[in-house]
Amino acid sequence: MVSPGILLVDKPGGLTSHDVVARTRRAFGTRKVGHAGTLDPMATGLLVIGVEGATRLLTYIVGADKTYTATMRLGQSTTTDDAEGDVVATADPTAWEAVTDERVRAGIRDLTGPLSQVPSSVSAIKVDGRRAYDRVRAGESVELAARQVLVSRFDVLATRTGDGVFDLDVVVDCSSGTYIRALARDLGAALGVGGHLTRLRRTRVGGFDVADAVGLDGLADAVALSPAAAARRVLPALEVSADEARDLRHGKRLVGQASRLQAAEVAAIDPDGALIGILEARGKDIKSAMNMPEVTP
C-alpha cells in the first residue's frame, strides 16, 4: 500500500506538469497523484506533488507565495510573452537611446508591490470553461481581466547585452497567481522596447524549497514528506489529544475551544504525530475543514 505524502520534484524543461504527475503515478504505482501549481513546459524547478490522501493538502499549498529566478529579454516581444512564441516586434535602435539604467530601475520599482496584472493570453486561465491558450491556438482573440497580485521582491542579479537585446537575470518573490512573463512583457512595454521571458525556474513554494527536491530519475527511490511534516511547513500546528483527535475524525466539534487557534486554518496533529486534518473556527468552537483519511496498518 502506498503511503500518503508530499513529494518535491525538480521539473526539467520540456515537460508539462501533467507529464511529471504521470511519471509519479508510475513510480509510486497509484493513480491518486496531483500537484499544487502548474509550471509551463519551458519552466524548470519546484513542483509540489501530493500522493494518495495527501492530495487533500494541495488546496492549502497552491495559494502559497513563491520565488522564481528568471531571465528577461528586453528588446523583443513575442506572441506568448516568452521564448516559446514567435517574435512579433524588435526594438528600433533609436528606442534604446531613452533606456537608461535609472529608467530600468524605475520600471522594476513600478512592478514591485501590489499590482493589477493582466495575465498572458496564452495562460492556463479558463475562459468560459476552456483554457485561454487553447482558445488562442484555435485562432480566437482572448483578452483576460486584470488580477490583483503582490510582488514583494524584484531584484536584478546580472545583466548582459548583445545583438540589440538586453538580458536581465532576476529573482522575484510573489503571491500565487503572479505571471513572471507578464512582468517581462510589462517592463519591456514601459521602456518602449518590448520584452519577454527566456528562462524561468521556480525555487520556492511557501515553506518548500527546490534544494530538497528530487529529479525525475530519482522518483523511484524518493521519500515523500509525511502529511504532518508537510502541513507544518504550510500552516501553524495544533497538538490535540487522542480523544480530541477521535472526535474530530468523527466530525465532532471541540466546543468552546476556538481561542486555541493561532490562525484561520491550522493543522491538527495527534499524540502520535499524525495529521488529523485542517481545523477552523466556527463561532466559539473548532471544527474540521478537512480530515485526512485514516491509514489502516
Image (cartoon, helix red, strand yellow):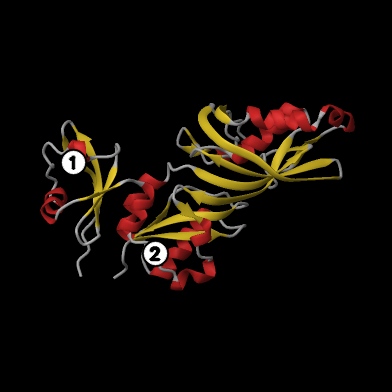
Q: Quadrant of residue 3?
A: bottom left
Outermost residue, right side: 94
Q: Quadrant of residue 196?
A: top right
The mark tally for this picture is: 2
Residue at point 56%, 50% (across, down):
202
Are the residues at dot 2 and dot 1 in contact (C-beta closer than 8 Å)? no
Outermost residue, bottom side: 221
Residue 72 percent coordinates (x, y): 70, 42
Residue 31 percent coordinates (x, y): 37, 62
The numbered mark, 2 or 1, whose residue comes first in the sequence reads: 2
Amino acid identity at mark 2: Ala
Tag 1 residue? 287
User: How many neighbours does mark 2 have within 10 angstroms: few (below 14), some (14-19), or many (20 or more)?
Assistant: some
| Label 2 – label 1 distance at C-alpha | 28 Å
Residue at point 44%, 43% (across, down):
64
Q: Secondary structure at mark 2?
A: loop
Whether residue 248 is situated above or below residue 127 in the rendered picture = below
User: How many neighbours does mark 1 have within 10 angstroms: few (below 14), some (14-19), or many (20 or more)?
Assistant: many
Taking 153 as reference, is 20 left or right? Answer: left
Residue at point 24%, 59% (across, down):
274
Residue 78 percent coordinates (x, y): 72, 39
Amino acid identity at mark 1: Lys
Is residue 249 visible from the viewing direction of this image?
yes
| Foreground residue among 260 and 32 | 260
Which dot marks residue 224?
2
Taking 274 as reference, is 130 left or right? Answer: right
Taking 112 as reference, is 188 left or right? Answer: right
Taking 55 as reference, is 67 left or right? Answer: right
Q: The C terminus appears in which quarter of the rendering?
A: bottom left
